[in-house]
Image: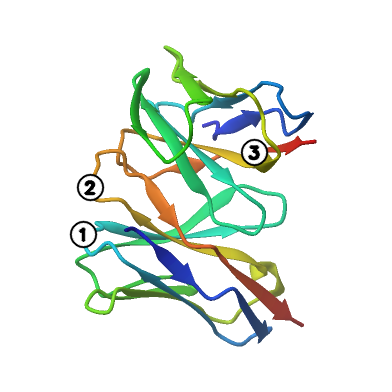
Amino acid sequence: ETGVTQSPTHLIKTRGQQVTLRCSSQSGHNTVSWYQQALGQGPQFIFQYYREEENGRGNFPPRFSGLQFPNYSSELNVNALELDDSALYLCASSLEAGNEQFFGPGTRLTVL
Amino acid sequence: GEDVEQSLFLSVREGDSSVINCTYTDSSSTYLYWYKQEPGAGLQLLTYIFSNMDMKQDQRLTVLLNKKDKHLSLRIADTQTGDSAIYFCAEGESSSNTGKLIFGQGTTLQVKP
C-alpha cells in the first residue's frame, strides 16, 4: 500500500509568481486536506476536498485554490505569491471526510 | 475561538519518562491526537484518544485526557534518543464534517544521552 506522496520536495519562487503543488492520496482514500506549516508553528488548515468538491476552508485568501481529480489526487495552487507564503505545505488523505488523516512528507516552498 | 496550547520545549535524559502537555478549547472535540515530526519530515500519527476516554496506553505511550480541564498529556516511557522530535497535539474540529485538525505550536523534545 502506497502512502501519501507530494511533489516537488522543494521549490523556490519569487514574489508575484504562481505555484502548483501536487499530492497523491493513499490508496482507497477519497478525501484530501491541505495544511500550511510556517517555520516554528503548527500546521494551519487551508482546505479539504472530498470526492472532487471543496468540503471546507480555513482562513486563507482566494489566491489559495485547489483541485481534486477523479483518481482523488489533488493540487494546491497559490497565485500572486507573497514572502509570507514561504512554508512547508502538507497534504493529508483520509478514507472519508472526518476520518483519521495520513500526512505526506510535505513540499517546502521558499518565496524570495 | 478554537485554540490549542503547548509548552515549547522539553529536555530529558535517555531512559527517563517524558510528559508533554496540551490544553485545548473545543469541548465538543470527538478525537484528540498526538503527532510526531522529525526534522525535514511530515507528520506521523502517534496515537489518538476518543473524547469519552480518560486514558489510552499504546506500548511506551500513555495518553491522559482530563475533559473537565480540557487538558491532554502524552507520556513517553523509557525515552530514547530516537524520540527527539517535535510533538504536536491536535483536536478534531467538531463543528464541521471535515475532521479539520487544529494544531498546537508543537513541543520540541530533546533527549540527552
From the viewer's side, name the closer residue of A79 and A72.
A79
Near mark 2 (Cα within 10 A), the count class, few <14, some 14-19 or many ≥20, is few
Residue at 78 percent of width and 28 percent of height: A14
Using the numbered discs, state the Cα–Cα distance from disc 1 to disc 2 in whole angstroms: 8 Å
Residue at 71 percent of width and 56 percent of height: B39
Q: Judging from the image, what secondary structure is the residue with disc 2 in?
A: loop
Residue A58 position within the rendered picture, expressed as x and y whole percent measured from the top left? 41, 40
Is residue B22 shown left or right of residue B71?
Answer: right
Residue A73 position within the rendered picture, expressed as x and y whole percent measured from the top left? 50, 21
Residue at 27 percent of width and 79 percent of height: B69
Is residue A27 shown left or right of residue A80?
Answer: left
Task: Tell me the residue that label 1 is attached to.
Answer: B28
Task: Tell me the residue that label 2 is attached to.
Answer: B95
From the viewer's side, name the closer residue of A41 and B55.
A41
Task: Tell me the residue that label 3 is attached to.
Answer: A85
- Above-or-below relation of A49 to A83: above
User: What quarter of the picture does the C terminus of chain A occupy?
Assistant: top right
Using the numbered discs, state the Cα–Cα distance from disc 3 to disc 2 in whole angstroms: 27 Å
